[in-house]
Image (tube, grey):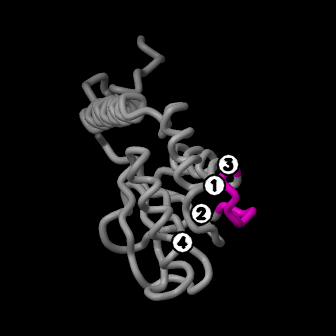
């Protein structure tokens, strides 16, 4: 007489198909989740952190020192928080080295609608001091090899530099 039953058997000893199918479903789901995590990790590793070379940093500092000074606030995307925050900290150090009045706090921005911000974006108020300062910053960033889009509608006395998701190229 058989006293121990498998979780895949019914009381009469036949296969319990619901348990078998549930187990197979869990295995397939686990494999899909694991492969998704590996693919996502490999994509992040391939894309790597945001960095700029010593040459770029030197060029950027020199160009910023020659540009008009003012207040700047740097914010980074929470969607790519690890890379964007690290890059924002590097940019903050460069701006401070060049003599800009940089906010001490780096805030993360959350984007609820639309395409996520990618790369660098400067936000200024048209015809204001921030517009004048922002134009110099944009030119310096582009001279160092960074694309920096300019948008209008910001604060009158402070340039806002958004560090979005790292561009894929």
Q: CA distance from mark 4 to mark 1?
A: 12 Å
Q: Which residue is mark 1?
A: 95
Residue 10 visible in rendering: no
In this view, the residue in front, 144 or 72, is 144
Which residue lies at the image location 50% right of the left edge and 76% below the top edge? 132
Q: Is residue 165 above or below residue 152?
A: above
* Res 40 label: none
Q: Tell me whether circle 3 and circle 4 mark residues in contact (CB < 8 Å).
A: no
Which comes sooner in the sequence, label 4 or label 2? 2
Disc 3 crowd, CA 10 A, few/some/many (<14, 14-19, 20+)? some
Report, in whole angstroms, how far the alpha carbon at label 1 lies from the one at label 2. Answer: 10 Å
Residue at the image point whose x is 45% and y is 53% from the top: 141
- Nearer to us of marks 3 and 4 is 4
- Please identify the quadrant where the N terminus is shown: top left
- Mark found first going from the N terminus, 3 or 4: 3
Please give the residue where the numbered disc 4 appears in the rendered image. Answer: 133
Q: Secondary structure at mark 1?
A: helix
In the displayed structure, 35 sits above or below 136; it is: above
Q: In the rendered structure, find residue 74 and report the number of the disc placed on it.
A: 2
The stretch of residues the image draws in magenta is 97-106
Residue 34 in the image: above or below residue 139 = above
Judged left or right of residue 61, residue 32 is left
Cβ atoms at labels 3 and 1 below 8 Å apart: yes
Q: Which mark is residue 93?
A: 3
């Amino acid at each position: 007489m058989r006293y121990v039953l498998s979780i895949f058997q019914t009381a009469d000893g036949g296969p319990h198909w619901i348990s078998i199918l549930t187990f197979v479903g869990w295995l397939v789901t686990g494999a899909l989740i694991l492969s998704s995590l590996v693919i996502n990790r490999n994509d992040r590793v391939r894309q790597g952190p945001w960095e700029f070379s010593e040459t770029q940093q030197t060029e950027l500092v020199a160009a910023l020192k020659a540009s008009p000074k003012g207040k700047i606030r740097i914010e980074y995307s929470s969607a790519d928080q690890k890379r964007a925050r690290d890059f924002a900290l590097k940019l903050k150090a460069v701006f401070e080295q060049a003599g800009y009045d940089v906010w001490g706090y780096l805030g993360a921005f959350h984007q609820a609608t639309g395409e996520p911000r990618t790369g660098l974006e400067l936000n200024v108020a048209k015809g204001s001091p921030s517009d004048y300062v922002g134009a110099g910053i944009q030119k310096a960033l582009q001279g160092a090899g960074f694309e920096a889009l300019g948008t209008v509608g910001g604060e009158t006395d402070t340039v806002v530099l958004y560090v979005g998701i790292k561009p894929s190229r």
